[in-house]
Amino acid sequence: MDEKCTQLWEKLSAALKPQVSPDTFKRWFSAVQLIGATENALTFRVPNNIYQFWIESNHMAALQAAIVSAFGSPRAVKFSCASEVPGKLDEEILPEISEKEFARQNTRDAKQSSTALGLNPRNTFESFVVGPNNEIAHAASLAVAQSPARTYNPLFIYGGVGLGKTHLVHAVGNHALRQNPNCHVVYLSSESFTNDLIHALEQHRMPEFRARYREKCDILLLDDIQFLSNKKQTMEEFFHTFNALHEGGKQIFVTSDKLPTEIEGFEERLRSRFQWGLIADIQPPEVETRVAILKKKAATDHIALPDDVALFLGTHIRSNVRELEGSLIRLAAFASLTGAALTLELAQDVLKNILVVRGDKPDVETIIKVVAEAMQVKPQDIKGDRRQQNIARARQVAMFLTRKITGLSYPVIGEKFGGKDHSTVINAEQRIEQLTGEEPDLSKTVQSLLRRLNS
């Protein structure tokens, strides 16, 4: 790594560390090196393709947000695996690759991907597994990719963490570019949009900011729009960006963890804009879909996955697709590093601490964890005393499901939820029973959680 790249990586690392947990940074980024940088692209060296897959699948949004924070604008991200270079690629070999060669390669790569900064080429419609839980969202996304701004505009996809929303966003961008290489696709997270706006304000470069998102954009793909809530100026800019794109016949595709009407601190005029198009959800996959996802991922990454191991993983890992695929990669990495065969016995041993044993009722901690993840709150808040509306509702749902699944007494449940009085549990049960009859979306959420916990 030359001195310039070292300095740039130090700056980027400082911006990245607040975006991820210390364990995540140590596990997935401490071995990463920045080996090439231009105004349009950054090239990182990673130890092997498992690092590349994991960063692309789980941490690209954080990496792009850090890039915007550190350098003021998004840049294309490229990876070079150590295993791609003949022999061992280390500090003795790296200086032999000239800075000019890196610049030439990065410039060529940047030109190929300049219209789609941040898109993951792995995330295509071909690699997306369709099931009853996501078929409407998939069909709508494909229609948008094939005919931008002619079918569903805007398209709003919502669902829990790790269920495939980002995959569909990337698939739209990748498909649109294959159809029309001159199409200008802009993909970023809401956090990156906010950081880009802040940088533009600080540098007095708002005309460039507005041109990038309103004039030089054919398809805007914005992930996790719920993070714009309570950011008044950011919502103001996005509102005008939305209007400019929509009036100009440009496609808008956003994702969220919840319905527009359920996003607190979100302006009503933005909520109403999303009603102009299609709103579709993604639910957690059933066991058959989970197994199909594993087999598809294993084939893509050239992992020899026996059927009994796929069924074992698909049966026991229920929370979301990201954790499902992550467990497969963890298992494959362990087998590769130790030279062990990828067998059912190995899977049971390596993953024993994260599996839910089939046939056993989930315990209270598991129910709280699953509800917290689905309803976007922290488990400790569910067991705490905070009365914020979204936390109180998640607590009531968790108590309701605990009573329904475990059959524990009200006092015992209250004790498990941080020492609550038994009357609190009774009220929660009665409240959720009432609301599920009045609010279809809540009823759907509760039923989905119940299926997931009982599957």
Image (tube, grey):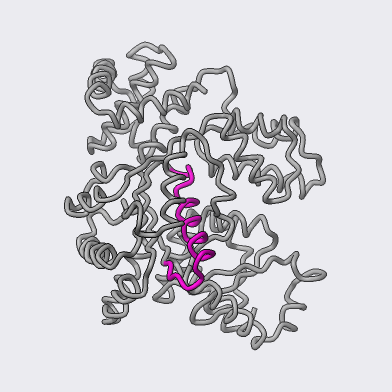
Of residues 413 and 107, the one drawn nearer to the viewer in this rendering: 107
**What residue is drawn where x is 35% and y is 57%?**
150
Vertical side of 323 occupied by 235: above or below: below
Of residues 75 and 134, the one drawn nearer to the viewer in this rendering: 134
**What residue is drawn where x is 77% and y is 48%?**
336
Image quadrant containing the N terminus = bottom right
Q: Is residue 169 magenta?
A: yes
Vertical side of 283 occupied by 425: above or below: above
**What residue is drawn where x is 48% and y is 53%?**
21
Q: Where residue 157 sits: x, y (%)?
A: 37, 47
Q: Decide if residue 388 is on the left or right side of residue 370.
A: left
| Count of numbered circles in the view | 0
Residue with the most extreme left position: 268
What range of the chain is rendered magenta? Answer: 161-185
Vertical side of 421 occupied by 354: above or below: below
Q: Where residue 392 sits: x, y (%)?
A: 26, 32
Q: Where residue 162 sits: x, y (%)?
A: 48, 44
Q: Where residue 419 sits: x, y (%)?
A: 32, 23
| Rendered image quadrant of residue 349 | top right
Q: Magenta-highlighted stretch: main secondary structure?
A: helix
Q: Decide if residue 112 is on the left or right side of residue 278.
A: right
| Rendered image quadrant of residue 436 | top left
